[in-house]
Amino acid sequence: MEKKVYVGSYTGPEKGKGIYYCLLDTETGALRRISVEEQCENPNFIAVNWKKKILCALNESDKGIWLSSYEIQDDGFLCYLDQKDISGRGPCHICMDSDARRVFFANYISGDVGMVLLDETGHFEEEEYITSHSGKSVHARQTEPHPHGVHLSPDENYLFVPDLGTDEVVMYVIEKDQLRKRMSKKVLPGDGPRHLVFHPNGKWVYLICEITNVVYVYLYSEENGLEEIQRISLLSKDMKNEYIAGEIAVTSNGKYLLAGTRTWGAAKEKQGFLTIFEIDKNGLLVLKKVVESGGCHPRMFSITSDGSYVLMANQYSGDVISFRFSQETGEIKKSDKCAIPEATCVWCE
């Protein structure tokens, strides 16, 4: 059996070519490139709605930033639908709701968050709804707001936005024509929130912080928002280089949490790492092991829906690595490597 895989990349001479369509062999772990959507410039992050067969890309160039939408055809090839210019600078993350009717985006440099709508055919509607963050924190990278992720609550009534620049997670109510701030949750000064993920039970939330390489564990309720119950490092004691954390994900059975980190500073061209945590009965994390990412600068990874593989996008080494994974035992083993220059993100069925 083969699963569809889509990979975003930075494009240009000696870089990536656009959105890559690959297939993952679930028997062997082999990855093979099938095609590339070359007309999609700098798709630095993509969102995939497998049910509605819609893929959206977040694009950027010297001329501006925009969103692109595609239909995922039965054979896996992408059919271009539409594009829409959006406001802001430094786009870094998008997500899409389960009906493929709302797309949310975060702009790291301009410090704002937006929402656009799709019609039932996957084409963008005219309106754009945008809200700006304000504030700063203590680190040299925190002189202004830097929203770094957009994440929907399980009921899709709320949008959670980790802001690396202001050391907080902002909770928005999603209304028909706006994002209305409900509350925010601060982290320790200098932690630098990046991305978060909900546990399948909807009660626990895990936040990864880029600057200090820690993961926060929260109890979540609609009434109280996020209540902190743990803060834990994703680095093992023998990891001495400088690191910046990347992606975070929970297995579909809720037993394990995975967190990626990238070597930085003088060691930024070296191997990255993936930390595997066991999740106990109270939602707390227990570090199980740390393994190499198979390449340099693992910007993003994803877990297959059945928990049998982890796919790692290593930007600097220009590859996607497949790892066979057991969501029952947490065991992981490298399977294959597929060359994709400047790979920035990866999604698999």
Image: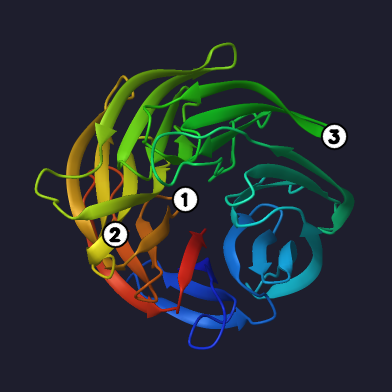
Task: Give whichever of discs 3 and 2 has the lower sequence position.
Answer: 3
Where disc 3 sits, the SS reads loop
Identity, as a three-letter code, of the amino acid under mark 3: Asp
Image quarter for residue 336?
A: bottom left
Image height of 142 relative to 51, above or below: above
| Residue bearing the label numbered 3 | 177
Q: Residues within 10 Å of mark 1 (few under 14, many from 20)?
A: few
Res. 114 mark: none
Identity, as a three-letter code, of the amino acid under mark 1: Ser
Question: Which residue: 66% across, 32% down?
Answer: 156
Question: Which residue: 84% across, 59% down?
Answer: 123
Where disc 1 sits, the SS reads loop
Q: Quadrant of the N terminus?
A: bottom left
- The residue nearer to you, when weighing 234 against 335, is 234
Image quarter for residue 258?
A: top left
Question: Which residue: 59% across, 42% down?
Answer: 150
Task: Give whichever of discs 1 and 3 has the lower sequence position.
Answer: 3
From where the camera sits, is residue 98 visible?
no
Image height of 69 relative to 256, above or below: below
Q: Position of residue 48 (x, y in %)?
A: 62, 56
| Residue bearing the label numbered 1 | 305
Give the CA separation, mark 1 to mark 2. Answer: 31 Å
- Residue at the far bottom in the pictured view: 13
Give the CA separation, mark 1 to mark 3. Answer: 32 Å
Judge from the rendering whether residue 166 lies leftward or rightward of residue 213; answer left or right. Answer: right
Where disc 2 sits, the SS reads strand
Q: Position of residue 286 (x, y in %)?
A: 21, 32
Judge from the rendering whether residue 13 lies leftward or rightward of residue 63; answer left or right. Answer: left
Question: Which residue: 64% across, 35% down?
Answer: 133
Identity, as a three-letter code, of the amino acid under mark 2: Trp
Res. 264 mark: 2
